[in-house]
Amino acid sequence: MGRPKGLRYGDYFSHSEGPSLCARKCRNVGAQGGATIDSKRLVELLRAVQSGQCSVEQALDRLRLLPFEDLDFATLDHHRSVRQGFPEVVLGQGKTTDQIAQIASRLSEQSETVLITRVGPEAFPSVQEATPAAVYHPLARAITIDRRAAPAGRTGIVVVSAGTADLPVADEAAITAGLMGNNVLRITDVGVAGLHRLFEHLPRLLGARVLVVVAGMDGALPSVIGGLVAVPVIAVPTSVGYGASFGGLAALLTMLNSCATGVAVVNIDNGFGAGCLAGMMNRGDRDGS
């Protein structure tokens, strides 16, 4: 038996007052799945809102779960940005070139921005053929599609890398935060082996709203910066280092045991997670803008 192609709102919402008109209008909206919501049901819902029989909040609550699109090998969540403020991101690792190209094409039809992480250069020609606006970022091993009229506006995020070898992870973080509508400032190669290099950047660090600090080896830089600033520091351990670094585990444990307050840690080499968290923290309000 194949997997179900749609969702039933009644499975996700309960109403103590019993099924309202809004609930009835919404329950089967998009029940057949696909990227397009059934226009008849959507019109009924909008008319219910217009007539006052359904509140805007009730309608939005029900629309948050739709639509999704079933590609057999992937189920695309086209309303991720409604719920979380940023579209679904594609992990290229483990996917075929054709799968990546199809996913990118379908996502780009529904969203102005698309991000594909952990993808090699061999996949890019197929993605670009399907979506000409695609751009490949070799350092971060990422593909982006950005059709916004005025990309990048908010300031406040600074991405700091301890060493040049940490740049791929730092670049992934900066690209992610940039796609979320931020002007990202980058500071590179200021690790603790030459701490004096950090001092000239102190005004930028103090002016940030959130910092992403990427470091391998001993992983000490986030603690140093965390002791200098009064804003959140997102620490990113990398797998850069020699034998006893254990692929980034040493840096991870150093960051988790930081004595500096306000330091939070993401997974090893998780530049995307750090960039996404920084972007969410840098929002001016809570509606996802």
Image (cartoon, grey):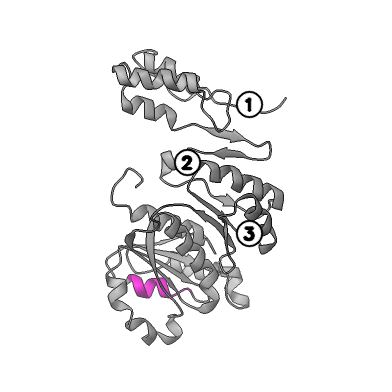
Residue type for callout 2: Arg
Residue at x 64%, y 49% (from the top left corner): 130
On screen, residue 185 above or below 143: below
Q: Quadrant of residue 229?
A: bottom left
Disc 3 marks which residue? 119
Badge 1, how many Cα within 10 Å: few under 14, some, many 20+? Answer: few
First in residue order: circle 2 vs circle 1: 1
Disc 2 marks which residue? 80
Residue type for callout 1: Pro
Q: Position of residue 24 (x, y in %)?
A: 43, 15
Spatial distance from mark 3 to mark 1, Cα to Cα?
A: 30 Å
In the image, taking residue 27 as reference, residue 127 lies left or right, namely right
In the image, taking residue 286 as reference, residue 275 lies left or right, namely right
Quarter holding the N terminus is top right
Indicate the secondary structure of the residue bearing disc 3.
Answer: loop
Q: Is residue 65 visible?
A: yes
First in residue order: circle 3 vs circle 1: 1
On screen, residue 60 above or below 40: below
Spatial distance from mark 3 to mark 2, Cα to Cα?
A: 21 Å
**Magenta residues, dominant SS class:** helix
Residue type for callout 3: Val
Disc 1 marks which residue? 4
In the image, taking residue 138 as reference, residue 234 lies left or right, namely left
Residues in magenta?
219-226
